[in-house]
Image (cartoon, rainbow, N blue to C red):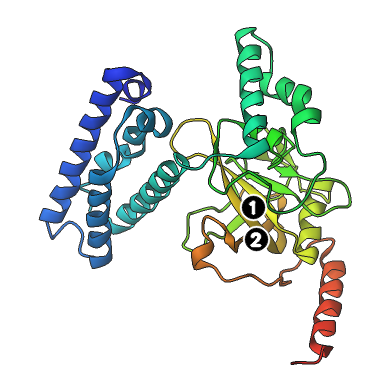
Amino acid sequence: RKKAIMSNSSTTTTSSLSTVMVIKERLQGVLNNPDTITDAVVVESIKNSLKRLDMIDMDKDLLGQSQIGFAVRGFKSHANAVVEGAARALLRKWRRVVDAEESSLHVVCTGRAAQALQKFRERLRELERDGKAKPDMVAYKELRHAWAPSRRSHGELEGVPIGVKLEGRGEAAILGIHQNILSGIDAVKDEACYAVCLSGGYADDHDNGTDDGTVIYTGSGGQKGKHQVTDQVENNANLSLITSVDTADPIRLLRRTENGKVGFYYEGLYRCTDYTYEESVEGPKVYKFTLVPIPGKSRHSTTVQDAGVKVSGTGSPSRKRIASKMLRKQEREERKPRR
């Protein structure tokens, strides 16, 4: 079924429409059986999902970009499950995937950013046709001086809207969102972090789509073959996020898509409000950074209040230094006359 969804023209449309019809029938069957799920909130969520299925525009562009049929296969497998926790998890994933895919169809770059993206894609296709190795890196290297932002900056980028969908890390680099293609953390020595990328590379990452959008992001280093084999250290990448706790500079967040197709969403701006240095799920110690969406500047901002910087936890080599700085900052704020 996945192959059918990814094919073009009428075969794709027919297969995906059939899949959606099956899912609608299964979900309706759950609602017709009151003994299956007893939680009223879950029942209401399923009703809303059925309405969304009716409203989704199943045209060729939507199918080609979002693989809606692939995204909803989880419902087909678990529609009759009696475990309400599984139903809740499926509903959360469904909402995230569909919300992202539907919104991304109408979110595009503008101005010079749109021109840079077009130039990059054209050059990338040429390199791919020529069979060049690592074409995205080659294209970025060739075009960055002419089209990437002339200087690094924290925060928003002109012409780059929150929610825009990108085909790869090279596109994020040419737009200035995340300019380190090979690393999850976009960092420069002795500066606060510019951006991070969530791509599922660390087992300790925690990004479960909670209402407030908070992300627990694992630091860099100590891995071999995607396994944590040694303690992480204060390299430039980890130090940049530690510095961000003190400076509160905004951090751009890039997230890999969840629908089985390679791609990334620009999630907007986050702040690093806290971090710990603790044992990972595989044993060696890792940094865990708390990233919180900035109100009005991220896709989750409507449910989040602006996060102040806090310091807690123990064990990090830099904890005392950061805590001392923050304490002095708080004391200065407290001494300011109140209006």
Q: Could you say where residue 291 lies in the image, as x and y percent from the top left?
A: 64, 59
Residue at 50% of width from left, 65% of height from top?
302
Residue bearing the label numbered 2? 290
Q: Could you say where residue 116 lies in the image, as x and y percent from the top left?
A: 67, 31
Cα gap from disc 1 to disc 2, whole angstroms? 6 Å
The one of 271 and 80 positioned closer to us in this rendering: 271
The one of 243 and 157 positioned closer to us in this rendering: 157
Residue at 52% of width from left, 30% of height from top?
262
Residue bearing the label numbered 1? 217
The one of 131 and 289 positioned closer to us in this rendering: 131
User: Contact, CB < 8 Å: mark 1 with mark 2?
Assistant: yes
Quarter of the figure with residue 7: top left
**Secondary structure found at label 1:** strand
Q: Is residue 136 left or right of residue 93?
A: right
Total labels: the figure holds: 2
Where is the C terminus found, in terms of image quarters? bottom right
Q: Can see residue 172?
A: no
**Residue type highlighted by circle 1:** Tyr
